[in-house]
Amino acid sequence: MSDLLRVEHLTKHFAVHQRFLGSRVGNYVSAVDDVSFNVREGETLGLVGESGCGKSTTGRCIIRLTEPTSGSIFFEDRNVGELQGKDLKAFRRQAQFIFQDPYASLNPRMTIGEIISEPLAIHGEGTRAERQSRAKELLDVVGLNPEHISRYPHEFSGGQRQRIGIARALALNPKLLICDEPVSALDVSIQAQVLNLLDRLQDEFGLTYVFIAHDLSVVQHISDRIAVMYLGKLVEVSDWKSLYMQPYHPYTQSLLSAVPLPDPDRQRNRERILLEGDPPSPIDPPTGCRFHTRCPIAQEICSNKEPELLQVASGHTAACHFAAPNPVPVGVKGTTAATAVAAVSG
């Protein structure tokens, strides 16, 4: 299976200006820092991490809603950063975005028929009647009544609005969808419906997804591979099964320990890995490993040398000087930072 998308050394810094003694002092937020990954045609890559880690910025840079500071993005072996004018417009036919907020992402002054057919009008597709017909077809595809085409967004629930957003993204028959936390604002039962819809659409239309989320249980349901981000950096990449069964990075292990278990007895008898302190500021990230200020197994090298994202098992990479499967056993009571350090240090 060939790569549809390749991201190489992607970096995005946002300028921050502060006034000091009458002059402007320049600084920047390191939102995404030297991130590289690939997405194969027809697969779903889950991009996960806590709020502020840079995952949404990565998605917006891929489609050039936000211009990267540096790095390269290749779509079907074409450098997206070099595209201009008609070529960039043609790329955006093939790569579409599903936004997180189903309320703010739809224009309240437009009917849903106008919203869904707007991409067709922008790209000069068909007559007005043909675009309306296509909008009705897409409403049916996402499980909504085509007869409601003249209604406005406020007449629909949050889950229905997200379906409208999905229909709009499908209007131009794209190959790639960047899904930016598309279910985080929805109730759990509605989340399942939208995820099942995305699964069905992927099989039906051969779509490729970059699925951005902070909930690992949601990502597990839909992803083929998962990339974990922390403070602008990728810390672990693997297929979903290996990541859930044998995580190597301490940050991934802490995230997984927070996922509720469906078995009440197992849930009651396990202990969460609670990280100390708050995430560092992206304006002044720590030296060395960015996770070392909260890591239960950090040692001196972690604050001095940044770990590389290296292969730790077949198809599994992690950026940790002490990468090992379950160095802090998930769910085992009595584990301390001291015993964890002893385990990885031998």
Image (tube, helix red, strand yellow):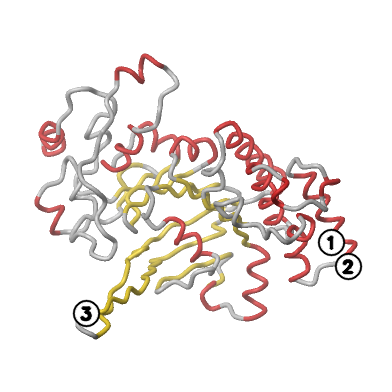
Residue that label 3 marks: 20
Pointer 2 with pointer 1, Cβ within 8 A: yes
Q: CA distance from mark 2 to mark 1?
A: 6 Å
The answer to which of 64 and 114 lies nearer the viewer is 114
Q: Which mark is residue 131?
A: 1
Residue that label 2 marks: 127
**The C terminus - image quarter:** top left
Task: Decide if residue 212 is on the left or right side of residue 312.
Answer: right
Q: Position of residue 310 (x, y in %)?
A: 30, 52
Q: CA distance from mark 2 to mark 3?
A: 57 Å
Q: Determine the residue positioned at 22% across, 33% down.
A: 328
Pointer 1 with pointer 3, Cβ within 8 A: no
Dot 1 alpha-carbon crowd within 10 angstroms: few under 14, some 14 to 19, many 20 or more: many
Q: Position of residue 153 (x, y in %)?
A: 71, 52
Dot 3 alpha-carbon crowd within 10 angstroms: few under 14, some 14 to 19, many 20 or more: few
Q: Determine the residue positioned at 74% across, 71% down.
A: 122
Which amino acid lies under the numbered mark 3 shown in the image of this protein? Answer: Phe
Q: Residue furthest right?
A: 129
Work out whether 40 lies above or below 297: below
